[in-house]
Amino acid sequence: MRIIVCENYESLSKKAAQIVGSQIILKPNSILGLATGSTPVGMYKNLIKMYEEGLIDFAKVKTFNLDEYYKLPVDNIQSYHYFMDENFFNHVNIPRENIHIPDGLASDIENECISYDESINNSGGIDIQVLGIGNNAHIGFNEPTINFNKGTHVVTLDESTREANARFFNSLDEVPTKAVTMGIGSIFKSKKILLLASGKNKAKAIYDTVHGQVTPQVPSSILLLHHDVIMILDKEASSLLNEDDYESVNDYEKVK
Ligand code: GLP
């Protein structure tokens, strides 16, 4: 694991976009695993800018999103389909047929989950997976639980997650109780993983990821076992880490 601590959210977003952008330059037909939430929005803005400046071309890129709310219409402004269109897909040239997001409205949801993992595998696997992290250390919508769930599946959201995400809805009641998410296994198969965390409310989750033991109670802790993870943090998200923690990771860098 490599930890990069950035001065602020702006430099974190730029650094993340540079890493994803260089992946696309080196391999134009890259398979990207994408995340929602407020954290990657700055990265998407920087990637759009790089596209507009002619630095990167998405014509051959394929994408797979981590998750979607269960039974939330895709035209609902809180759906992750809507979020991705607004924040990224409407602004770059990824062919529509190359975009994949779990279908939370599928009539046969179990089959949808199986075929989602099959499509990832058939595409050759994810080259770089972008992750945010929940306050409770969830990745995708893999909540703290008693075992690491392998494939894409339907999950019941923790109340703390619903409360954290209620800021995007009119009220807590409107926040769906379930979601479809790539499993820890689907995420773990990615060749490279980029986890972004910004702000004080993520500091504990980051500390638990790096410092503690690998346990499904801290879903992000599985990343310690992956061979190629970069965590990009701003100062606040890294504020609970200390020198001892850095010894447990392979590399550590500070950028302005
Ligand atoms: C949601 C998403 C996660 C995301 C998390 C954190 O729960 N399913 O993928 O990492 O929110 O979101 P934010 O970046 O807004 O803090």
Image (cartoon, grey):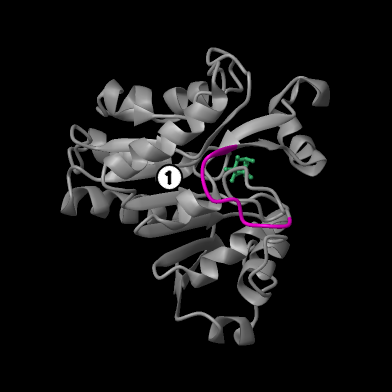
If the picture is divided into quarters, which one holds ligand 1? top right
Question: Magenta segment range?
Answer: 146-153
Tag 1: Cα neighbours inside 10 Å, few (<14), some, or many (≥20)? many
Q: Is residue 147 magenta?
A: yes
The residue depicted at 63 percent of the width and 47 percent of the height is 142
Q: Is residue 162 magenta?
A: no
Residue 45 seen:
no
**For residue 197, which quarter of the picture?**
bottom right
Q: Secondary structure at mark 1?
A: helix
- Residue 57: x and y in percent read 19, 37
Is 210 located above or below residue 139 in the figure?
A: below
Looking at the image, which is closer to me, 148 or 84? 148
- Residue 107: x and y in percent read 55, 15
- Residue 14: x and y in percent read 40, 52
Give the position of the C terminus as an image quadrant: bottom left
Is 225 located above or below residue 18 in the figure?
A: below
The residue depicted at 54 percent of the width and 47 percent of the height is 183
The prevailing secondary structure element of the residues shown in magenta is loop
- Residue 114: x and y in percent read 46, 35
Identified by mark 1, the residue type is Met
Q: Is residue 207 left or right of residue 107?
A: right
Looking at the image, which is closer to me, 82 or 44? 82
The residue depicted at 63 percent of the width and 87 percent of the height is 244
Q: Which residue is mark 1?
A: 43
Is 81 located above or below residue 133 in the figure?
A: above
Q: Is residue 105 left or right of residue 136?
A: left
